[in-house]
Every structure is written in C-alpha cells, then in structure tokens.
Image (tube, helix red, strand yellow):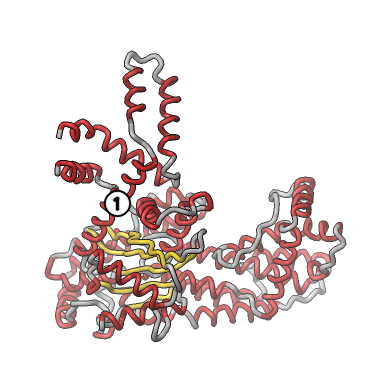
Amino acid sequence: MNHIHSQNPWIKVLFAGSLAIVRNGKPFTDGEYAKTFMLDVANELFDDLPNKDKIIKRIQDMPLSARTVHDRTVMMATQVEETQVKDINAAPFFSLALDESTDVSHLSQFSVIARYAAGDTLREESLAVLPIKGSTRGEDLFKSFMEFAREKNLPMDKLLSVCTDGAPCMVGKNKGFVALLREHESRPILSFHCILHQEALCAQMCDGQLGEVMSLVVRVINFIVARALNDRQFKTLLDEVGNNYHGLLLHSNVRWLSRGKVLSRFAACLNEIRTFLEMKGIEHPELAETEWLLKFYYLVDMTEHLNQLNVKMQGIGNTVLSLQHAVFAFENKLELFIMDLETGRLLHFEKVRQFKDACTASEPTKNFDLKQLAGFTSSLLQSFKARFGEFREHTRLFKFITHPNECSLNADDLSYIPAVSVRDFEAEVADLKASDMWVNKFKSLNEDLERIARQKAELASKHMWTEMKKLQPEDQLIIQTWNALPVTYDTLKRVSIAVLTMFGSTYSCEQSFSHLKNIKSNLRSRLTDESLNACMKLNLTKYQPDYKAISKSMQHQKSH
C-alpha cells in the first residue's frame, strides 16, 4: 500500500496531462514530447530558483509514455461514459441524434449522440462512435446500436425521439433504423429529418436555368483553381489590380455554406475572371450577357439569405421550437422577397440592384426580367412548404414549453411521450391557467427569451461570436422555469422536458465527424476502435473526468 500512496501525487498530474494531449487532438506519443518541452523550458525558466534541481527531477520522474497516456485516456473515457449512462437513467426521457460517415481508413463510423435533462441543464453527449465493419443497411446500424444499448444498460423505455439525416438506411419504411426501433419497442417513437439537411436540400435551387448558371461558375473555378499554373497566375493578377481577395474558392456539395461563399467570391472577382479568361483565350460569352448576369447576381443574393438561415440554426442546444421558428420566419421572408422582386424595389437583393443600376446608367431603356426571378423565389418557397412536415405536425407540442397556458394539446399530441396521463395533464393545465402567479412566471420567461434574442441579434450583426457563446442558453432558461414549478405540476413538467430533449438537427453528429477527421487522420489511420472512441468521448463531452474517483478505483484494484 505504501507504493500506492507514493504514486498518488502523480495521479492527478498524469490524468491532467493525458487529457490535455487528447483534447488538443495530439497522438499518445506526444506525452514524451510534452515532457521534453517542459524540461527544456524549466531549465531556463527556473534558473534563479534554489529548488530548480528538485523541479527538474519531478518532471523527469513523471511517467508520460504513449502507453501511460493511452491507458489514462481509456480510464477517463470509461468514467465519463459511466456518468453519462447514470444521468440518462436518472432523467425522465432522452432522445438520440444519429448519423453515419466513413473515416480515413474507409471504415464506417456510426455516431450516437444523446440529449437529456440533468437538473437545470440539458446535456448533449456523444455516447459512442460505433464502427460498422460490413454493410451499412438499416439492419446493420440497428444491430450495432442495440448491442451497445444492452451492454451499457440504456433505459430504452425512456427513448422519446430520433433525429437522422433522412437517408434510406435510417428512415426506410420497413427495414430502416427507425422502423426497426419502433418494431422492437412496440410503441410510437418520434422521428425527425434533420432540419439543416432539409434546408440544405431546399437551398440547392440548381435545377433548370439556375443550375446552368451554377454549373458554369463551377467550370470556370475548376479551370482556374484546379490547375497549379492557372491558380498562381490568377492570384498574381488579383494582387496586381489590388483585389481584396487572394483567390477563388472551390465548391463542395457536402458543405452547407459552400455554395453561397463560392458565388460571393466569384462575384467579387468577376472582372478579373473575365480578364484572365481572355488572356487564356477561353470564351465564355455568358459572363458578359445581361440575362445570365441577372440570374447570377440573384443566386448570389439568395444564397446569402439561405446561408444566414443555416448559420442561425447551427450550434448545440437549439430547441426544436427555435429551429422551427427560424424556418417559418424564413418562409415569411420568401413571400416578402417575391413582392420585392415583382415591384422592382430590390431592397433585399443588393447585388441585383447594383447590377441593374449600373446597366440602366449606361443603357436607360434596358429591360430586366424580374418576374422570372420572382418565379424562382416562388419555387423555392414551395420547396420549403413541401418539407419540414414533422416540425409542422407538432407545432402545438413545441410551443407548449414557452406558452403552456395558451396551448391546448390533445391525446394525439401526448401519445409519443411515455407515462403521461392525459387526465392528469388536462387537470394540471386547468390549475395553471387559473394561477396568475405561474402564468406570470411564463410571461417573465418569454421576456427573458426576447432579451436574449435581441442580444444575439446585436452581437451577430457585429460578428462577436465569442461573446454570443457567453449568453445564457435558451434551453437552460426554459428548463429552470419549469423546474421552479411545484410537484403539483409534475405531468406538465414531464411534457416540457420531453420536448426540450428532442433533437431538431444532427448538427452534433456533424461536429463529431469533424473531430473524427482530426483525430483519425492519415498519420493515425491505424488507431484502434477503443482508442478512437476514448479520444472522441473526451473531445466532445462537457463532463470533467473525476481524477480522484478514478485514482480510488485504481488503488482498490492494486490493493487486491
């Protein structure tokens, strides 16, 4: 036992060092580099201290081998996982966001993110990244998830909803993951098609004439950027004419904001692009045609509006209500945009207006077919109206979390929420409506939500994203209000927490894949499943590993 106690001073240091290495996306072997770095710095930094030799000796004695860092990482990840499962079991409900992607070694990885209430906090936690060795059909994903759920003792009777990217393997009618899950649980489980994926599908707008415009833009960009000599020469041209940009952007279909950014950069460099193509003897007469340019500048303006919507819906902790509001508000804007184009005001189409004014100045009699642009916008509006069905269907349920005294929910609305009595719900709503004190509580909540919305808008207009993250999360404000209610409103509280746990997007999954790409890179392509899962969990979790609890566990094991 003396040996164990002599190791105690190192335990916290080793865990803290290992956690820092993993959270910075560094390989386990960087423990030795960190030690060398500390020794080199300490040798100079503590040169004037009388106990310098003692400090150097401490650093030298610190075990930070790759094996040590790996083992500590797995221990911390295991402890975090145990805490996650414990909190999920204590929560009234939990929901899942699921997505699948392929890593650098062509292995399919299935990301499982859970959302649940823990006290006054709503947590979004990565439960696992499950490796799928063979095919990725709905049955394969379901089998892998259920094996994990059984192994970790997840309370599947508390599972409320699932959010996916809408792929056939997820939402297939008979053999999709959701269908198999509902069959296994023998009860209705809410399924949401990620609102960001649906918005991105609407935003493509690239059929027919607008598709031809985008296609030409991509061809021209590829001609310039994909050839090294052309790229160098074009960048030199931009520098010579004093353009603020230093090159064009390549288009990527899988990146949500790519289209808008590519078009915006192309518009800013259009004169230089024309000059460069002329120098190369490449003819694209469309780049000077009024009709083509009108549609091009329309695409620039509209994709900018769509990108603003997409950014507003990104991030962790968004409630289904706030995501739904963002989409519905944009549909109202599209109706405004149609009127704006039909009347020729162009207040919301800055690039189109500038192009029109420039053409009119040189050719006053020039006609512009703005009705066609209004038609494009009308088609986009119809595309939005045809989607987001599950979000429209449950509007009353979503609104309940902030306006419980105004929403009248029926048995169908409550049928998806396990262990909620319609009788108790109706009686508690009647009590709530009669109590000015609790009605005023929710009026105060909405005033606070309005204040946060104003602060967000102000900070966003100044691009102060770091400051925005410091604002109190809306979901936390809502759950604190509900938790303040007495036990006599327990059923209403359960319903509100159920809605707050629902995922409206798979943003958390996409974020996990970004971490996956950084952790399992070309240089670390042979990382084992256990090591990858541990690194991913420690990178994504909001829990802080409890070094003391882990060290006690280690001591208990060693004493035997």
- Report x, y in % for residue 101: 47, 66
Q: Three-letter amino acid code at disc 1?
A: Tyr
Name the quarter where the N terminus is drawn.
top left
Residue at image point 44% right, 45% down: 27
Which residue does the numbered mark 1 point to in the structure image?
543
Task: State left or right for residue 76 relative to residue 370.
Answer: left
On screen, residue 252 above or below 142: above
SS under mark 1: loop
Q: Residue 178, can we see it?
A: yes
- Report x, y in % for residue 82: 24, 56
Residues packed near mark 1 inside 10 Å, few (<14), some (14 to 19) or many (20 plus)? some
Residue at image point 15% right, 41% down: 559
Q: Quadrant of residue 487?
A: bottom left
Please tell me which residue lies in front, 255 or 547.
547
Task: State left or right for residue 61 relative to residue 99.
Answer: left
Please tell me which residue lies in front, 538 or 309.
538
Q: Quadrant of residue 172?
A: bottom left
